[in-house]
């Protein structure tokens, strides 16, 4: 992939002031990229994947960086919240016959709370493109949950065929997000698991049903796989996977758990 170099120009006096605090050129550039990535993601100028790429961090690390700075990883608009609840309501105990694709954010969120097996219990198996496998199992190699994802026989890794379409989608989405949508089209998916808002809207425009992490927890409760969603949501927050307060409250209300 071709790259474009962006340069930060500092006056000599400013650079000397920063260097007094032990800030090297490399660290100044690194911290600047992280802050820009956070700002552009928060303002919804970049998708989660593209913001992660700008930050120079892994998807796992950037999710935690956002959460540490009180920026929700998942922050749907009203349309997406309504779509999430509607899709979750229509997933039944026969969901195992569905063709399901997944992006990395859903997998990372479930891995953080040690509930990746919910996907197996609901869908029997899911498919992910190679770029997503790299994000969850390669970049997160040392993470406790990454090993379970890497060794899960019910997670099927697939290679996409249409790289031209993936490259076109990468003008607005990151590689993993783009490959998920291409793979969904190639395999005629029944459902795409996505939490990134830009990717969700692209999937809906392409005619796919979408659902994210909150929807999975709602389905799991309805099927008796978990007793409540509140515990999982609170664990996510503790594990630096931040959800917006609006989504949390609406999800708890949907699950009948809002006190």
Image (tube, rainbow, N blue to C red):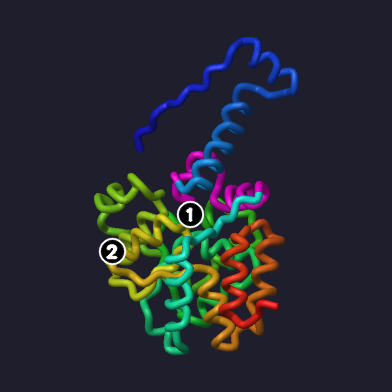
Placement of the C terminus among the 4 image quadrants: bottom right
| Residue 62 falls inside the magenta stretch | yes
- Earlier along the polypeptide chain: callout 1 or callout 2? 1
**Cβ–Cβ below 8 Å for labels 1 and 2?**
no
Left or right placement of residue 160 versus residue 76 in this view: left
Q: Nearer the viewer, residue 20 or 44?
A: 44
> Compared with residue 64, is residue 211 higher up or lower down, i.e. above or below?
below
**Main SS, magenta residues:** helix
Which residue is drawn at the image coordinates 46% and 82% (left, top)? Answer: 89
Residue 24: image x %, image y %? Answer: 65, 22
In the image, 62: left or right of 90? right
Circle 1 SS class: helix
248 and 212: which is toward the camera: 248
Camera-side residue of 129 and 89: 89
| Quadrant hosting residue 220 | bottom right
Name the residue that disc number 1 marks: 134
Q: Which span of residues is magenta-colored?
A: 45-69
Outermost residue on the right side: it is: 21
**Is residue 87 highlighted in magenta?**
no
Calculate the distance from the C-alpha at mark 1 to the C-alpha at mark 2: 25 Å
Q: How many marks?
A: 2
Q: Residue furthest top?
A: 12
**Mark 2 lies on residue:** 206
Residue 46: x and y in percent read: 45, 46
Q: Position of residue 172 (x, y in %)?
A: 36, 47
Q: Label 2 neighbourhood size at 10 Å, few (<14), some (14-19), many (20+)?
A: few
Per the rendering, the mark at residue 63 is none
Among the 4 quarters of the image, the one containing residue 188: bottom left
Q: Is residue 18 above or below residue 58?
A: above
**Residue drawn at point x = 62 percent, y = 58 percent:** 242
Quarter that holds the N terminus: top left
């Amino acid at each position: 992939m071709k790259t474009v170099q962006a340069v930060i120009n500092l006056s000599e006096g400013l650079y000397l002031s920063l260097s007094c605090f032990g800030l090297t050129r490399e660290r100044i550039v690194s911290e600047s990229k992280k802050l820009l990535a956070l700002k552009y993601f928060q303002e919804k100028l970049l998708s989660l994947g593209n913001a992660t790429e700008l930050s120079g961090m892994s998807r796992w690390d950037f999710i935690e960086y956002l959460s540490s700075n009180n920026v929700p990883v998942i922050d749907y608009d009203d349309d997406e919240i309504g779509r999430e609840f509607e899709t979750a309501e229509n997933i039944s105990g026969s969901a195992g016959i569905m063709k399901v694709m997944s992006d990395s954010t859903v997998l990372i969120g479930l891995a953080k709370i040690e509930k990746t097996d919910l996907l197996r219990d609901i869908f029997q198996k899911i498919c992910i493109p190679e770029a997503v496998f790299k994000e969850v199992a390669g970049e997160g190699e040392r993470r406790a949950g990454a090993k379970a994802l890497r060794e899960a026989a019910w997670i099927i890794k697939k290679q996409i065929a249409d790289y031209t379409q993936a490259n076109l989608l990468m003008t607005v989405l990151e590689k993993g997000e783009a490959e998920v949508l291409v793979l969904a089209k190639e395999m005629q998916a029944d459902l795409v698991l996505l939490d990134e808002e830009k990717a969700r809207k692209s999937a809906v425009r392409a005619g796919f049903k979408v659902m994210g992490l909150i929807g999975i927890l709602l389905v799991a409760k309805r099927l008796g796989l978990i007793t409540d969603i509140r515990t999982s949501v609170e664990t996510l927050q503790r594990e630096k996977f931040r959800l917006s307060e609006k989504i949390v409250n609406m999800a708890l209300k949907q699950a009948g758990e809002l006190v």
